Image (spheres, rainbow, N blue to C red):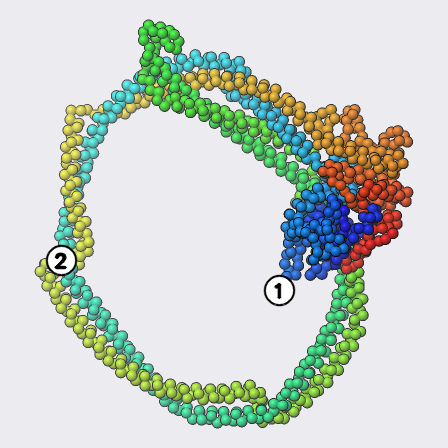
Amino acid sequence: MRPLRLTLRAFGPYAGEQIVDFRDALGAGLFGIYGPTGSGKSSIFSAISFALFGEPARDDQDASSLRSDHADPHCLTEVELIFELGGKKYLVRRRPEQMRPAQRGGKETKEAHCAWLFDVTDIPLDEITPENQGTPIAEKKVSEVREELERRLGYGKEQFRQIVLLPQGRFEKFLAANTNDRLAILRDLFDVSLYKRLTQKMKEEAKAAEEKIRAERAACQSRLELEGFATLEDLCAGAQKALEEQAVAVSAAEAAKGKATLAEQILAAAHEVEKAFAENEEAARALTSIQGRSEEIEKEKAVLNGALVARGLRDVDGVMQAARTDVATATEACTKMQTARATAEEEFVAAAGALEAEQGKRGEAETLREQCAALKRHRETLNHADRKRVDEAEAARIEREAVAAFEAAQTTQGDLVSEKADIAARLKAAEAAAAQRATLSAEALGMKSKLDAARIHDGALKAVSDAQGQVARAREEHEKYRRVLDDAQCSFDEAEAALAGAQAQHLAEKLRPGEACPVCGSHNHPAPAGGQAESAGRNDAFTAARKALDGARKAEGASGQTLAAAQATFSERESYLAALVKPENTVAELESLDAKLRGDIEALGPVIDLAALRDASNALENKLPEAGKAVEEARTSRDQAKTGHALAAQALEAALASVPEKLRTMDALEAAISAADEEIRKRDLAFEQAVKSEREAKEKQIAALKDEESASNVREAALAKLQEAEENFGKRLAANRITQEQYEAHKASIDRIEELQAAIEHFGQDLHAARERVGRAGKAIEGKDRPDVAGLRTVHEEAARLRDEAYQQAASAVARADSLGKLSESIAKAVAAIKDAEDAYAPLAAVAHAFSGRNNANMELEAFAIAAMFDLVLASANARFKPMSGGRYSLERERDVSKGAGKKGLDIVVHDVHTGRTRATATLSGGETFMAALALALGLSDVVESVNGGVHLNTIFIDEGFGTLDMETLDQALQTLQDIVGESRAVGLISHVELVQQAIPFGFQISKTTGGSHISQRFA
């Protein structure tokens, strides 16, 4: 990749547009980029990196911070790079995310990150413009532009930073670093993560296999100890003894079963007789209870008769109640009409009084008409004074403008004085803040190192605590599964004993005297199993119990393995924590101190340009005399304007002498005339309204008298109907021979008539049924004695207890015999499987150990791969270091004798031809160290280039590192760089060292100003 032209707009320290044309520099081969510290030399390379990959050259710089602080708000930050690659030319343009002024509203809006890529192969470089930019490849979408560029370049941003920009200071540090530090640096340059992942994977697999074998051995021993045996042989002997105990327990269980069955049958018969005696007693109690309700039923019959009579009188009662309601309604209406008539009379009296009052005010209206005529005469006077008023207003305007001009001149002069004093104070504060900022920044760097170490220690401490908690949880889980295994074993033993008992009974039923037993072969059967062979469901229960037992065993074994793994993790984390140095302060304390330092720095505010403040102060000093002169001129103009305004006001006053002061404006006068007209109109309207109100009140009074008479007639008719209804109701009461009070009492029970009838009927039915139940119960106990149920229950419970104990003992014996037999078989298989796993684990462990560094070279696989690449780097570096040192020096990897003969790390030594021996790189002089570091950097660039797909580097940049070299050393270094140019490479030197500028004058010069930096081309 050869850069041809770079255009910067509002980028970094460059405020406006800056163009860097690389064509002449690339033609020269060796060129420089020069300028003072902080002027923006490295920003050129950063701009190339941003144009290609969307990220600046430094990892710690965010793309959104690339905008220049000096740029105009309307100038967007943009980078454009035209470069040559493989015989073709490309143009890439990119804008970072940034804030810009909104088109409306005066606010800001966010401009998103965007990029464009064009093919400009067929366009001459000088003819490439925004209107003529070739064939588009990708537009707007940042991801598409990045993918297209990486595909054509053959590398990404990390490789670009490693092989195109060579930071010399970094390689001098690399030259003197130890093996571990150098290994960390090389990891950044060479991608050997595959070997590290492979080593870690093999290590984890070997560790997992080893932990599994250890856990399985522990599980076998735990199972033996759980049963109380020390060895597998002891377990086999215990299983044989359990078989003998099983036979004795099964025989005893069958005898106990027969006795319990007989006791159960006797108890069942006694329960039936006891039920008959209990029923006879309950039937007698029920009959007595029902007979006791007879008196209550008789009372309810009397209530029912009264309710029936009251229900027959409800019609005449309803007519009487309706008549009473009509009388109340008519009375209420009559009262309302009387009230309305009185109100109408009062309103008529009030309206007549109001009309009389208005008639008395008719003389005031005439006076108002005369005043209105006088006001209209003042209108003619104001019309004659209009010219005088215009002259006075113009004079007033001139005075106001003169006063405002004088005050503005005074304000300008005062602002200049205040601004000059403010800038002087700001300059003094900025100088003090700059000194304080430097001190605080140094303290903040030290605090960050302490805080990082404290956070690592706290993380390790938390990891130990977490691992300890995991061990506790794993141990609790393991104990839980051990208890589940115990329960499953007991359930299995019981199910197996039950199944064995059923099978023994089934076989006993088929035994015949003189025939051989299908189990033992004997022809004698002295004590066959008794009872019935009821085995339904026992085989399924046995199968389920065995399945549950197997699951419990697997879960218990897995939890044991989990516990062992958790304990190993806890041990590793404890070791790591012990290796760390405990910080003197806590993270919270250090964060507080760090936050305070950062707060102190932020409190100082942004960095202020001291030179700009001084220039501003001088400019204000030059403006003060001119501002004083302007104040005096404005004062004279103000005084003249005041005199003119006073004369015009005096002429206007003479013209308006006959008009009252408050009416000298046409608006005020017209308002007074309108008010007088309005008052006259209101008085005429009030009189007309009073006449109308008096007439309407009289009509309303007559209508109210008629309504009152009509309401009185309606009330008289309602009273007559009420009297007739009360007489009819009294006659019906007499006919039924009850009083008014009795009727009211019976009326409350009308709604209960159906309820009372049903209750009386149900009582008769219940009484008949109770008498029949007593007869049946007496017949059921005739000729029988009452049994002793409690005594018979005690006998049955004792027999059942003895039977259950015998069954339990038999089931336990059967289950233990089977369990011990299967356990011995299971453990024997597990021991064999562990042996097979150990045989299979051996090759895996050997490979994992070799990858982890336990090999003849004492090197991990990752370090071995880096060492192999590092040998290529040293070979390429020596191709330059030997000529630079006159054939005297070459770089070698040092033999590490502390790890045995022949073991090599990544330490570098220098072989000196003059002495024939090697020595440390620290013994080289300053110039020799620079040559070694430069050779190492170029060698590393060659190797990185070769391992990244054969990418050819047409242009590389070397950033700093020349220091204070003497002329001889500098000549040797430049000769080496010239040799690189001879290999079809262009080399750009980024430096501020004067000797380099003198030796390589051709290139670019960057000048630094208060308004931003500028780039110009240097010529030889």
Q: Which residue is drawn at 57% across and 29% down?
A: 563
Judge left or right: residue 177 versus residue 540: right
Q: Which residue is drawn at 44% across and 13% down?
A: 243
Q: Residue at x 63, y 26 (%)?
A: 206
Please tell me how many numbered marks the rendered image carries.
2
The residue mark sitting in front, 1 or 2, is 1
On screen, residue 755 above or below 950: below
Q: Which of 589 and 825 is in front in this view?
A: 825
Q: Can residue 790 be seen in this view?
A: yes
Q: Position of residue 297 (x, y in %)?
A: 16, 46
Q: Name the N-terminal-most of marks 1 and 2.
A: 1
Q: Which residue is drawn at 78% across and 25% down?
A: 902
Q: Which amino acid does label 2 sit on?
A: Gly
Q: Which mark is residue 396?
A: none
Crowding near the residue tagged with mark 2, few <14, some 14–19, many ≥20 C-alpha atoms within 10 Å: few
On screen, residue 882 above or below 985: above
Marks 1,2: beta carbons within 8 A: no
Residue under label 1: 105
Residue under label 2: 312
On screen, residue 414 above or below 235: below
Q: Which of 272 and 983 is in front in this view?
A: 983
